[in-house]
Image: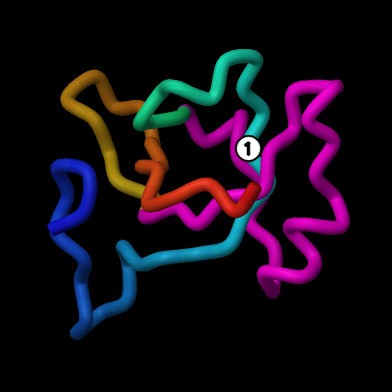
Amino acid sequence: MKGGITLDDETQLVREHFAVVQARKPGRQRFAEDCVEVVASEALARERARPAAGLHAARVAGPSRSSEGVRLYYLVYWLE
């Protein structure tokens, strides 16, 4: 279980990804889908990160649907 969700090894619907996350204050633990850009590798996430612009490289788990119907990604760890 990561960040309140269960990873789905069987169907791979919810799994871990490298990503660039738009966050002004990187203290949050979950992010709406429109704030997360999933990328192919850690190197690509680090390359696209722009902390001064609020874009941070991270490892995230998701997507998971919230009780309100929003698709969320949960922070596993920041790469910076």
Magenta span covers which residues? 32-61
Q: Locate residue 21 relative to residue 72 in the image: left or right.
A: right
Relative to 23, does residue 50 appear above or below in the rendering? below
Dividing the picture into quarters, in which one does residue 7 lie?
bottom left
**Residue 75 image offset from top left, x and y in percent:** 40, 43
Depth check: 49 or 17 in front? 49
Q: Residues within 10 Å of mark 1 (few under 14, many from 20)?
A: many
Indicate the position of residue 34 as horizontal and vertical percent values. 60, 30
| Residue at left offset 80%, top offset 66% | 44
**Residue 41 lies within the magenta run:** yes
Please say if 79 is above or below 68: below
The image quadrant where one finds the N terminus is bottom left
In the displayed orientation, state which residue is furthest to the bottom.
Answer: 10
Image position of 41 (left or right of 13)? right
Label 1 element class = strand
60 inside magenta stretch: yes
Q: Position of residue 77 (x, y in %)?
A: 44, 50
The residue nearer to you, when weighing 42 against 67, is 42
Q: Is residue 65 left or right of residue 44?
A: left
Residue 13 image position (x, y, % from top left) = 32, 67
Residue that label 1 marks: 21
- Residue placed at 17% from the left, 25% from the top? 67
Which residue is drawn at the image coordinates 47% and 28% (left, top)? 32
Q: Is residue 72 above or below residue 64?
A: above
Q: Residue at x 85, y 35 (%)?
A: 50
- Nearer to us in this view, 32 or 75: 75
